[in-house]
Image (cartoon, rainbow, N blue to C red):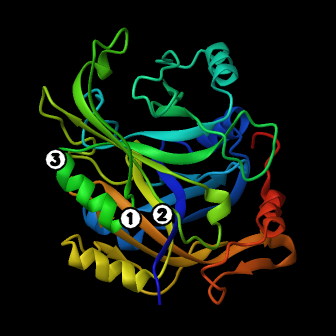
Amino acid sequence: MIEIINGIQQIGIGVLDTKSVFNWYRKHLGFDILVFKDEAVASLMTRYTNGTKERRDAYLSLNLVGGGGLEIWQFKDRIPCSPKVPLKFGDLGIYAMKIRCSNLDKMHMYLNRLKVANLEKISSSDKCNTSFYFEDPFGNRVQMVKDTYAFCKRTSKNGGVMGAVMGVSNMEQSLNFYMKMLDYSVVLYDGVEATKGDSQEFKKGSFRKVILSQERKNIGGFGDLLGPTQIELIQVLDRIPVKIYKDRLWGDLGYIHLCFDVYGMDLMKEKANSLNHPFTVDSSDSFDMGDAAGHFSYVEDPDGTLIELVETHKVPILKSLGLFLNLKNRNPHKTLPKWIVKSLGFHRVKKDF
């Protein structure tokens, strides 16, 4: 038996209204494949919801150009809280998601016409990524990264999620966790930077930045769709960072977790224990999200940032005809045929709802 990390399946976003967020990302950033929408009780997450079994609404959307998706998550019985203080670059937790984009110039012009907030200039400051930041209409920071990987050609200007920018308090401890737990063994960049912040006061300061990727020697399932990924770790050097989710619940506004598609959950659990980062949540065998099913677990990085691991068992292809893809007994070393993955296009949403 072997453990395999196929890629980043999705990033979780706590929101006020699932439909509004889904429709914006569908229309403007090509996340138009609605894999499922599900309303249920998050009964296993009470550790992170003050002991209450919160009812929630969740959508999973994908961009078939390639990359991870968005799990858009909304409390049903409480109003989610925003951060207590304005979010600053390097605060502890998930600061931004990284989205791949083959043509940054066109995307930048498009977002400028949309008048998105905090739109930065295109920059190559770290000599690894050419990128820019902006803020979506819901207050979430997004880094658009120059990247030519594509699972399939579409009219979308960008692909899916290729990683996250994460604030850490101790770089060496975090490197040990991400390299050993999630196999991010390739160091693309490691340097100390400083910025005056321009008009972006939240990014002002001095920090160490490390960008990691995986060798991806062994992938299966949806690995070709998810594509190569990056983890960007930021340690601020001139102030004490605060926890992004300090005094707030999982599911409150912002990036609530980063989720990896894996095979071999039992081995992942053993690895987590050996690194003194045991699973904090474990569905044990199989959870059911209505149209999809699998085995999920959570582990915390050294700063308490939530990493979700999902071993997918069932995915809907054409629900109206009762067609589902069963992954439980497939060869985990082989990626799915492209035509099967493209059949997720049956879930494309072409207009707001």
Marked residue nearer the N-terminal end (2 or 1): 1
Kindly identify which residue carries mark 2. 260
Kindly state the secondary structure of the residue where label 1 is placed. loop
Q: Which mark is residue 51?
A: none
Marks 1 and 3 sit apart, C-alpha to C-alpha, by 18 Å
Task: Single out the mark in the foreground, 2 or 1.
Answer: 1
Residue 210 at what x, y percent from top left?
A: 32, 41
Q: How many numbered marks have been drawn onto this rendered protein structure?
A: 3
Q: Which residue is drawn at 26% across and 54% down?
A: 175
SS state under label 3: loop
Q: What residue type is labelled 1?
A: Leu
Quarter of the image for the C terminus: give it: top right
Residue for badge 1: 182
Image coordinates of residue 343 in percent, x first then y, are 82, 64
Residue 25, given in percent of the width and then of the height, sits at 64, 38
Q: How far apart are marks 3 and 2 (CA)?
A: 23 Å
Q: Can residue 79 be seen in this view?
A: no
Q: In this figure, which residue is indicated by the disc labeled 3?
A: 170
